[in-house]
Image: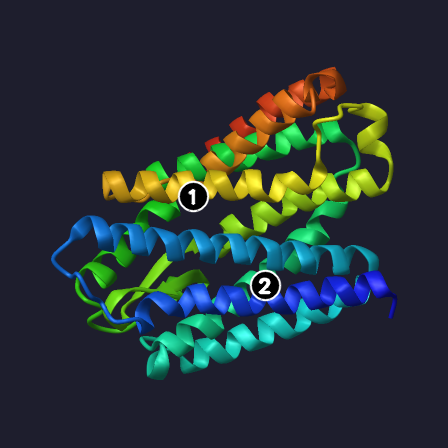
Amino acid sequence: MKIIEQRTLGKAALFFLLWLVFAAGNSLLPVGLADVPAWLATRTGFFVLGYIMAALFFSRSLALLALTHITVIRLGLIVCPLLLFLCYLGQPYSGKTLSFALVQSLILISGAALLGTALSSAVRRPGELFPLALTAAAADVISVLRGPTRVIGEQLSLYYGGDMQGPVPFVDLFLCKIGTLGGRIQPLFGVSDWILIVLLSTAVLRLEQQGLLAAQLPQKNCAAGSTFFVCGLGLCTALLCALILNTYIPALFFISLFYIAFLFICCNLRQALSIRDMAYSLIFPLLVGGSIFIIAV
């Protein structure tokens, strides 16, 4: 194994350990200052931010390995679904424990990183990134307002709002979770959110490796590696809005919004867009969003 690959694998292991610390740390530490809401909010926010940042670094390391070794993707996309199926079998018995939630979340994040990397191979030009991000945003907004995500959100609100009483909802299997105060479990985001983050970010990395990014977007400020953190910032913004408004927020909308803004401002994506790309940016969001709306009616 090459030195660079060994370092990447070592970084993945390090960021996994950091993720584990942030995922479980808040639930294991003593509550303390329980009567100071500002302290509790700051402490929880610190662990959530650390959780997301560690997961981003971990996923980026997996994506870099997968870009050079297709076997990593093939093996991961076999192992992760099998492990998730085992989680499904064990969900009725251990689904409410922190250890189960962390194992399940790690499987989801790893599988999403590998699947997103595999799907990113479909992006052949920088101009295709714009309609892809717009379509994902439109689909998520319609799904949250009128589609299946709205129904899922209501089920999860009843379950977690009712102190996790009753059977664990099936959709809970596809949520990445974190430990919170008093050993409780709190879902942060769905696996589809993470798949999109990795897909969009790895697509830029792949285009950079192929030389297409520099050829069509010769901007000094267009750092391909930054897209992971730009998308992560969009996810954090969605979580903050959900906390303030106390409702489910279409995270893919914020992820896509931050991603598109980065590409236009830092990479000058406008110069890479063709008429076909602009047409796709109008047609695909309307088709996908309209289909979800019609099915939900």
**Label 1: few (<14), some (14–19) or many (≥20) C-alpha neighbours in 10 Å:** many
- Residue 80: quarter of image: bottom right
Q: Residue furthest left?
A: 35
Q: Residue at x 30, y 64 (%)?
A: 180
**Which amino acid type is shown beneath numbered disc 2?**
Phe
Circle nearer the viewer, 1 or 2? 2
Q: Position of residue 194 (x, y in %)?
A: 53, 52
Task: Determine the residue positioned at 83% across, 57% down.
Answer: 68
Image quadrant containing the N terminus: bottom right
Q: Name the kind of residue labelled 1 in the image.
A: Cys
Question: Would residue 212 be seen by someone viewing this image from the given angle?
Answer: yes
Q: Please tell me how crowded label 2 is: few (under 14), some (14-19), or many (20+) other residues with Cα within 10 Å.
A: many
Mark 1 or mark 2, earlier in chain: 2
Q: Secondary structure at mark 2?
A: helix
Name the residue nearer the viewer: 174 or 295. Answer: 174
Residue receiving disc 2: 15
Indicate the quadrant where residue 227 lies: top right
The correct choice, above or below, for 199 with respect to 35 in the image is above
> Residue under circle 1?
236
Is residue 284 among the parts visible in the rendering?
A: no
Which quadrant is home to the C terminus? top left
Position in image of residue 99 (x %, y %): 40, 78
Q: Is 191 situated left or right of 183 in this image?
A: right
Looking at the image, residue 211 sits to the left or right of residue 22; the answer is right
Model colouring? rainbow
Q: Can you give x and y, in whole percent of width and height, for residue 44 in the image?
A: 31, 56
The spot of residue 108 in percent (x, y) is: 53, 64
Viewer-proximal residue, 58 or 177?
Answer: 58
Picture residue at 37% right of the left edge, 44% below the top: 239
Q: State whether residue 12 is above or below residue 200.
A: below
Tell me what residue is drawn at x 44 percent, y 81 percent.
89
